[in-house]
């Protein structure tokens, strides 16, 4: 069973990646949609190739996706499955460990490869090593790193079944949700990402990257060092304690390449690094490296892009 992630109107792209991972572990996959007024999400999930059934739990107390309410709903249905999958996102990491605890089963977190129905690979030590994990529990709870799997295609025609809804647990309530407004693509899903590091020196110099991102229709990212220095907002942070991205093109400007940052972007298809230090660790993972002063190289790149 795959726990769908959505906003009650649209199925989030990560769910398709989780379905692809689940299909590698088991031949048949059902998708559970928990929300309020989320029938359109269920219909979208039903169209994914490989999905056998879509289970719909629709109730007002599921609207905000509170883990205290979603976890009991997942637990009740999970006992009929061998695996429960979710994305290794804020939502999945909040819900699935609770489900595993209620089922008294082990939790496998941040899986990047399916080696068998009971065996998975996951990064440890900020991605410096890959652990192979095998679990003998009757039900496996697995969160999947979406960027490590391709998205499941359309072409399915699954049946949608409404399921009995668990009552409101009454343990938490939704207050508000604030979104960062930007005309740039979403960082986690962008095809091109331009990231800056402490080498930029100031928030004012960071604006230079905005021009470059505009030319490339790219999302903006930052290293933790740049965020901690106040050069960029927290939601731009890429890395072990930030967002995990895997765009087609990742441009790292003034980023030294600490292992915590590399853990968040090293799966990018093409990595371009600009840094004046030829010994910077970022060059070890870069497909293209430019040893140059970024204050000369970036304006020239912007000019060449037109």
Image: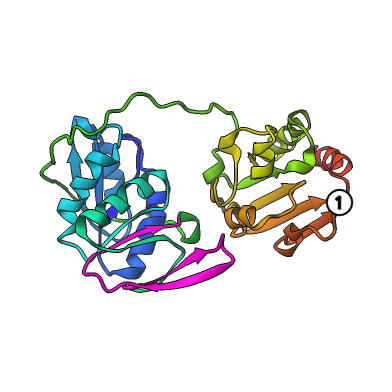
- Quadrant for the C terminus in the image: top right
Which is nearer the eye, 164 or 125?
Answer: 125
Q: Position of residue 153 (x, y in %)?
A: 39, 56
Name the residue: 73% across, 57% down: 282
Q: Position of residue 20 (x, y in %)?
A: 38, 61
Q: Position of residue 280 (x, y in %)?
A: 78, 57
Name the residue: 24% across, 46% down: 71
Residue 68 visible here: yes
Residue 20 placement, left or right of 57? right
- Quadrant for the N terminus in the image: bottom left
Residue 175 placement, left or right of 305? left
Residue at label 1?
276
Q: Which residues are magenta?
A: 117-145
Question: Within 10 angstroms of label 1, few (less than 14), some, or many (20 or more) residues?
Answer: some
Which is nearer the eye, 42 or 178?
Answer: 178
Q: Provide the secondary structure element on which disc 1 rests.
A: loop
Name the residue: 77% across, 32% down: 202
- As displayed, is residue 290 above or below residue 167? below
């Amino acid at each position: 069973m795959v726990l769908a992630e959505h906003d009650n109107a649209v199925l989030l792209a990560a769910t398709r990646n989780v379905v692809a991972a689940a299909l590698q572990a088991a031949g048949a996959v059902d998708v559970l949609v928990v929300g309020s007024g989320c029938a359109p999400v269920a219909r979208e999930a039903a169209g994914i190739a490989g999905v056998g059934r879509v289970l719909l739990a629709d109730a007002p107390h599921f609207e905000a996706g509170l883990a205290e309410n979603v976890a009991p709903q997942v637990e009740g249905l999970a006992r009929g499955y061998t695996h429960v999958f979710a994305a290794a996102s804020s939502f999945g990491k909040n819900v699935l460990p609770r489900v595993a605890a209620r089922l008294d089963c082990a939790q496998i977190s941040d899986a990047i490869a399916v080696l068998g129905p009971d065996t998975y690979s996951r990064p440890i030590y900020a991605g410096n090593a890959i652990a192979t994990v095998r679990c003998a529990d009757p039900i496996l709870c697995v969160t999947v790193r979406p960027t490590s799997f391709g998205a499941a295609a359309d072409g399915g025609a699954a049946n949608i079944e409404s399921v009995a809804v668990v009552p409101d647990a009454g343990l938490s309530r939704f207050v508000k949700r604030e979104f960062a407004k930007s005309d740039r693509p979403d960082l986690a899903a962008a095809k091109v990402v331009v990231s800056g590091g402490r080498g930029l020196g100031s928030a004012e110099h960071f604006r230079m990257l905005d021009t470059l991102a505009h030319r490339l229709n790219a999302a903006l990212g930052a290293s933790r060092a740049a965020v901690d220095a106040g050069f960029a907002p927290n939601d731009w942070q890429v890395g072990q304690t930030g967002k995990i991205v895997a765009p087609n093109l990742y441009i790292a400007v003034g980023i030294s390449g600490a292992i915590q940052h590399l853990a968040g972007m090293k799966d990018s298809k093409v990595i371009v690094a600009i840094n004046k230090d030829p010994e910077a660790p970022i060059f070890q993972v870069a497909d293209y490296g430019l040893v140059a002063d970024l204050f000369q190289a970036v304006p020239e790149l912007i000019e060449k892009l037109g």
